[in-house]
Amino acid sequence: MKLSNIRFLTAIIALIATILPSQARPEVPDSLAPPATTEIQPAVVVVHDTVYRYITLPPPAISDSVNVGGIYSSKYEKQRIRRQKVWNSLIPKQFTLQYAGSIGMLAAGPGWHYGRHHWETDLLFGFVPRYHSEKAKFTFTIKERYVPWDCRLSDTWALQPLTAGVAFSGISGDDFWKNLPDKYPSNYYWFSTKIRTHVYIGQRFRYDIPSHYRRFHSSVAAYYELSTCDFYALSKYSNREYSWKDVLSLAFGIRWEM
Amino acid sequence: MKKPSDKTFFWLFRGSLFLGTMLVVACDLIDYHPYDTRIEGKHHINEQNIGRIEAATAGKTTVHFVLISDTQRWYDETKAAVRSINARNDIDFVLHCGDISDFGVTREFEVQRDILEELSVPYVVLLGNHDCLGTGADAYRYIFGNPDFAFNAGDTHFLCINSNAFEYDYSVDIPNFGFIRNDLESLPENVRRSVVAMHAQPTSEQFNNNVSQLFEYEIRKYPGLQFCMCGHGHHTQVNEWFDDGVLYYECAAAKHREYLVFTLNEEGGYTYEVVEY
């Protein structure tokens, strides 16, 4: 047989296969199987680089209900799916563990990435040992990060040559106040001792776990960040001789993407 | 798993070189929190320096010392003051009247300490109200020592007392009359005159003015009380608050680039000059 004939045949077979999708539908357990009378097409939604396949669920288990417009066409179902999407987006997509960086000796917590992996938000709970003070302290930090580039080094390794962002950090304890306590005359101290604002830049080195080795995470990244907080920056701003090593703060961390 | 390519190794090599260089610098840059009180270097300085002052001035009947105050977040000016003081050779010691930090942040104490360590003469530092913020008082206690202390320079007794009652909501004994009484009772016999130093003077909002009369009464029990010294007001001033002849010398903040030089002379009197640097 000629080669062109084989191609022609394959094309015909492919066309038939697309016309008859119901033939190729996978088997579903009886309990989940929709009533045979309802036409259900598995919906495939493509969100940039990730493919989500919605599991087709049976209609409400009320025996005498009449399903007029199909499972996804009812107002209730559309609203239900939208609600699920909103709540699903709140599930953390990454987890971070950070050492130092002026937000605690160790800080850890969940985070989210969005905007084509360019933006990230981390919520970190940190711990500061007591050292020479009266007691140990806890910190709570919100970190916002922008990652402009993702440079692939190989199939599994990638470098994010710049990460930059801003963080707001609070510390526990009666010694610290967010707003000036009432006892002071107004503007006695113009700053808050509880809330610190940090800005930082850093780099990240990522290992994408091959899919067949994945257990809980899809990638692991090690990063460092150089940051400064409002107090340190202000000290440098008004003093030429103030050393940069007293302005900057270095952090190391690991980020697991889930 | 796929074997990493040569390109990967190249990047790994460059990356590790870079990280290695970073690690060398890293130790200095590790900061757990601005208020972590994780302090490296010299500590309990007042006690050590008092020993040096007392040894160097033993038997002297003339004492020269410099009063500086409120150097918070004026690092350039503090450095200039240190250079100016080091350029003189008539000074026995330096007394800092408090507010060494602006926010009570641990690094501020360390940086200021390192600047003052450049002094060629010993120094002591009092506790200021800004030093009480956050964990500042804890950092102060570790680096400098007890906020109430006393020492003798030659035949002169120096009482340095914490007067920041407002920062502690008047809930602790500030000024500490118990300390003053004990100090009075244990004065060496050769003391013929006294000087009192504090951060905030009576009438200031930091001072516990409910006991300012009593405070004056107590310190006047000191033999040959010459004058009192303070900071906090940021301007060089002399005040007499109680119509009793006891003058309160206020030293300007470092931003005004001024310090006071006191000379306690052999005749039992004193002179002072305001030095601009």
Image: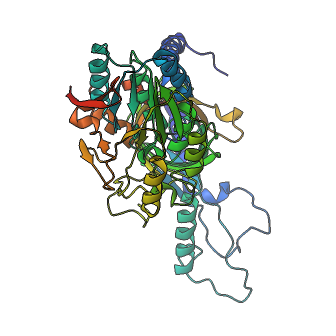
* Quarter of the view holding residue A84: bottom right
Q: B52 or B44: which is nearer to us?
A: B52
The quadrant of the picture occupied by the N terminus of chain B is top right
Q: B57 or A170: which is nearer to us?
A: B57
Place of residue B119 in the rendered image (x, y in percent of width and height, measured from the top left):
38, 18
Residue A195 vertical position relative to residue A230 in the rendered view, above or below: below
Disc tally is: 0
Q: B276 or B7: which is nearer to us?
A: B276
Name which residue lies at 41% across and 29% down: B112
Query: Can the viewer see residue A169 in this picture?
Result: no
Place of residue A113 in the rendered image (x, y in percent of width and height, measured from the top left):
49, 47
Would you say A164 lies left or right of B187 here?
left
Would you say B107 lies left or right of A235 here?
right
Q: Spot the residue most to the bottom.
A: A64
The quadrant of the picture occupied by the C terminus of chain B is top left
Name which residue lies at 51% across and 30% down: B151
Place of residue B89 in the rendered image (x, y in percent of width and height, measured from the top left):
31, 13
Q: A49 or B97: which is nearer to us?
A: B97
Q: How is the image coloured?
A: rainbow
